[in-house]
Image (tube, helix red, strand yellow):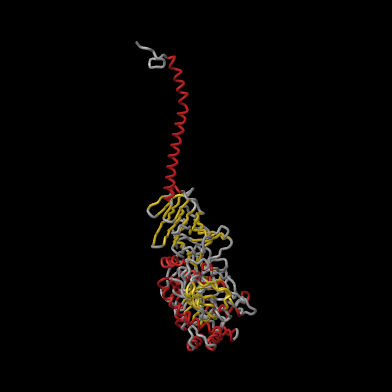
Amino acid sequence: MYQVVPGGAGGTVTNATPIKQKLKRDARPLVVASVLGLVLVIAAVTAWCYYIGSLRKAELLKTELLDLNKDGYIIRNQAGAIVFRMSFRSGTLDLDSCSKEGEILSCGRTSDRKLKFFIQTVFDNTVQCYRVRWEELVPSLPVEHAMTYNVSHWYGGAETAIQHWPIAISGQQAPKPFVTSDIYSNRNGFGGILERYWLSSNATAIKINDSVPFHLGWNDTEKTMYFQARYHDTPYKPNPGEAPCAELSYRVCVGLDVTSIHKYMVRRYFNKPNKVPSKAMFRHPIWSTWALHKTDIDQDKLLKFAANIRKHGFNCSHLELDDRYTNRYGEFDFDLAKFPNATAMFQKLKADGFLVSLWTHPFVNYDSENFHTCVERGLFVREPTGRLPALVSWWNGIGGILDFTNPEARDWFASHLRSLRSKYGVSSFKLDAGETNYLPWQFSTKTPLRDPSTFTRRYTEMAIPYNERAELRSGYQSQNISCFFRPIDRDSVWGYELGLKSLIPTVLTISILGYQFILPDMIGGNAYLNRTDGERTLPDRELYIRWLELSAFMPSMQFSIPPWEYDNEVVEIARKYTAIHESIVAPRVLELAGEVLDTGDPIIRPLWWIATGDETAYKIDSQFLIGDDLMVAPVLEPGKQERDIYLPAGHWRSYKGERFDIKEPLHLTDYPVDLDEIAYFVWV
């Protein structure tokens, strides 16, 4: 017999319905919990996947010691410290467009446009280098990156009117063309000797590629330097037929220390001299007529100048006949009113043992007899259309400037120099000017120039046949011209603006840029009446003596204001230091000059060259080294017969015979240095 059990399989409908409703009410929290759990699991899986993707993306955007982000990148050294920081000011990278293949990390977009961007890592022994390139695809858009400079001390770039070592940046400057300029007349420009190269105390260096239409700016408040490429409102030009799409490309290299990374960069990226100039230029002073006579030079004054050199017992590498021996600028014949018998004059000077070099320049003034010839033959730089010669203004008037990209103009200029050598026995030439600021803002040349400073390079090439004793004051990629380069004219003042204090920072800067055969301008400066510390037209006597002492420890010496314009004591001091230069300095410099051909290493070196981890050495701008073993500390302040001296660790002997065997750097405070002395120390 069967029994009906309520709620069983055969139970009644009336009993089943309430049971189902009860089950629904009891199951609702479980369903909600299950759904919530599922959502949480999905969220967790999504977050994990996003996290893994982020890690992969972050790992993708790293290459060796460089980390890339949408706004820029940082570079670390082997110890993990950040040594370089660059930010992008011309766009934000779309990181989703980035990919990595081998050692190349590339991106194809910013947040609003396409571009070509890549960073390639190159490891070379102990040096880590990064090739960086940002190329715009839209014509006329600039590319700008901003380098933070407050984490270290920086050196290089260009000579400037106010020169400091390390670089001291003040104020704000929108990016402007990084081209050669005459900073004597244009004191806010970049100097006549420059290269696209900077070096920092934390062993990092940056070299801007030659192809870049490069502009440099800065902001001292933000502690940044702006590296910009652009073709709008600039004298830079794209290659013929190319769209003006800007490209900023450069190399950043990180090494073990500042000296070794600089050696690496110079060996890899700089031109080297291929010969050493005349040994006489290292051993004996050059005597120029400029500061003493200016444009009033004539035959009698030149012969008297030479006679006084011998009368007072001085040696002479050569005499330099400076501005205005011709009747008009752009001519090459002697002015008969001032030099009635130039042939006899040269014969007399040769008989007395004097070689003579002549001042020259790239300008032909409109009142010169040669102006019409140059116009007719198309030898001048032209205005932008190329149809008419461009008139330019320079410190001696208005005229045309020879187009040294034109072989015919080069031959015309060179033939006149050869004629002067053949006719009079001229030994060499002082090639003045050559900076791009004397070109029109927009110009046309026979061979188109993408980079205006290439004009400077072409001008310096005219010195090659005379580089035994030639002198240049401008240079761009011109290290292999193998002649002496002179910083721009100095004023006869003590300070950092083209004065005595600027001399060491300028020479160190030029040396870092690869120019090692340095003629540090005339002893005492130009002696312009309105730019001279002194009661007469002569430079202040004390300034002159201190300048003379410093020049004796440079690669070459140049007199123009002669010491006998003062008194017998100054003459004796001059004799003493020309002898020191010949016996102590010149042999060391000549040995180092021979090494420059292979290494490119500086002859005049900063103290950090031998003290790479020394924070104090990075900031010293009033001492320098000749090679590694001769340290010089001149007095550069008026009224001082003492100075503080910083001795790096090592074994030193002073010029007074004192021994310093020190394991740590040593400060010598108020070290006595008489007026007729300069402090120097030799590594024992």
Task: Measuring from the top left, give residue 284's x and y in whole percent.
Answer: 49, 82
Query: Can you name the residue that lies furthest to the right here?
Result: 535
Query: Can you name the residue that lies furthest to the left here?
Result: 1
Task: Measuring from the top left, give residue 329's x and y in whole percent.
Answer: 54, 76
Image quadrant in which you'd find residue 499: bottom right
Task: Measuring from the top left, give residue 593's x and y in whole percent.
Answer: 44, 76
Q: Is residue 653 visible?
A: yes
Query: Can you name the residue that lies furthest to the top here?
Result: 1
Q: Is residue 378 visible?
A: no
Image quadrant in which you'd find residue 270: bottom left
Who's the residue at 41% across and 76% down the image? 594
Q: Quadrant of the N terminus?
A: top left
Q: Name the residue nearer the viewer: 432 or 397.
A: 432
Q: How many marks?
A: 0
Q: Is residue 105 above or below residue 52?
A: below
Q: Is residue 450 above or below residue 28?
A: below
Image quadrant in which you'd find residue 241: bottom left
Q: Name the residue nearer the viewer: 559 or 25.
A: 25
